[in-house]
Amino acid sequence: MRRASLLTAAALSGVVLLTTGLSACTAGSSPSGGAADFSGVQSATIQIESEGTFANPDNGQTEEQAGLGSGFFISSDGLAITNNHVVVGAGTMKVHVGGGDTVYNAQILGSSECLDLAVIKVDGTGFPFLAWQKGDIATGEEVYAAGFPLGDPEFTLTKGIVSKSAAQGQTAWASIDQVIEHDAKIRPGNSGGPLVNAKGEVVGVNYASVAELDSNFAIHRDAAQAVVQQLIDKTDVQSLGVNAQALPLDSAGSPSGVWVSSVKAGSPADAAGIQPGDVLLRMAGKSLAADGTLQEYCDVIRTQGTDGTIDVDVYRPSEDALYRGQFNGKALTAVTVPGIGASSGGDDGRTYTTITDQSGTLSMEVPSDWTDVDGAPFTSDTGRKFLDLRASTSLQQFSDSWGTSGATLSASPATDEAALDPQVIFDSYASLTAQCGAPKADAYSDGVYTGQYRYYSGCGGQSDFVIVVAYPADTSYVLVVTVAIASQADLPAIEHVMGSFAATF
């Protein structure tokens, strides 16, 4: 089974996780409202304690936790900006204003995992707030990072300059076009706090750092202002409702994917059945996070839309199981093909690639060293026309003997009863399967297609052979998938093929 790499984005500035909540705080009155200048930055900066169920990619454990981050008011009536990763998935939020003891409740209005932004509404009125800087944000400009790092209730302000006014914004936590790099030090707990100029005006929202390079990053004012009204209006932007972190392919060959720390209630992810601790492997047929960033994940959302029906493949480490389903469509269903799971031989450390047939209708994911690919259609002995796709290290050897691994994917319109009868299709392979032991047989379901499968062992004395006959919900066409495995090392290829095959009629 492809196991998720339990890596942390240690270089990123995240929330500070607590084992217990804050001690009880005394009540107090709200500060008087108004636009703050530099001397009032502290009074408009908040510390946010989020409590909820979060999955920790360090150890894979899912538990109730509390975490601390920062934020800042943008209006006197309690509207505040912070990071998505600070608040999404929280069951409750407690807010402290300017380092004070008073505890305020708050609710999330809108969020975006791709932009790592969220707007919350803090109970109360009359709060000091920060204005946005007007005009260009120039390299070399003096800036200050405000917030509450390391879970400290004491307000912190660090000084620096803008190193780059247009830095690379692809990280494990976000995919942003406009990012500011600066050297005003930020640490875990600073996430969501303001980056201000010498007048106390906001130039960006702090969200990440690379400590060993002494580099710190803020979401550019323009990127935040472009979506803030939508978030205030309770419209999520570039979001499926997860607290996301990219996990790249590691040296041990563990797969890339998007780790889900928490899920927003009522979101498309929640409706699909995504759980904290899941790893999103593919969306819309596209592998995710191979470069360790959220770019592929967010590109799919930008292309398909947050309301679009998006196919998704999910690995659930707690069950060592693969699921398939859809955002805004079919809920996740466990893949039921044998060979997917612990028995598949584990990760093989290989890279995989997606191949298509000549028409572009069929696709599947195969080992990259299966370079002998044929996507030409064919006509069966009975005159039925099939689209076809097959791959191996050598298709000639794959066709001639059981000694070579490979896979095939065929499709045909289901125009008669014979095409809808799995047994008829299994019988068409009788000359091959006669060389195998008795099969394991069961129903097949992967959240997109349903049907039946046969799993044979000892074919030709050495190979495993899987045949899947599957149909879409409207049974308008039939798909036939076969995988022959000639060595133990190739067993993980079964999962990749079965977890990725698709037809787009």
Image (cartoon, grey):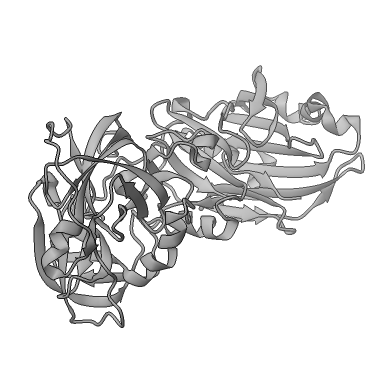
Residue at the spot 36% in from the left edge and 55% down from the top edge: 116
Residue at the spot 67% in from the left edge and 43% down from the top edge: 408
Residue at the spot 25% in from the left edge and 82% down from the top edge: 138
Res 122 visible? yes
Q: Is residue 437 left or right of residue 352?
A: right
Image spot of residue 26 (x, y percent)? 11, 35
Query: Can you say whether 105 is above or below 168 in the image?
Result: above
Res 403 visible? no
Pick whichever, 349 or 321, lies toward us.
321
Instruction: Report how many numbered discs are placed on residues in the image.
Output: 0
Q: On the image, which quarter does residue 173 sit in?
A: bottom left
Pick whichever, 75 or 83, lies toward us.
75
Given the current orientation, which residue lies at the most extreme left position? Answer: 154
Q: On the image, which quarter does residue 479 sit in?
A: top right
Residue at the spot 44% in from the left edge and 61% down from the top edge: 229
Image spot of residue 21 (x, y percent)? 18, 32
Q: Is residue 278 left or right of residue 65?
A: right
Q: Is residue 410 left or right of residue 61?
A: right
Quadrant in the picture for the N terminus = top left
Query: Can you say whether 503 is above or below 37 in the image?
Result: above
Pick whichever, 347 or 76, lies toward us.
76
Image spot of residue 423 (x, y percent)? 80, 24
Query: Can you say whether 12 is above or below 430 in the image?
Result: below
Q: On the image, which quarter does residue 320 sit in?
A: top left
Pick whichever, 416 or 223, lies toward us.
223
Image spot of residue 367 (x, y percent)? 52, 48
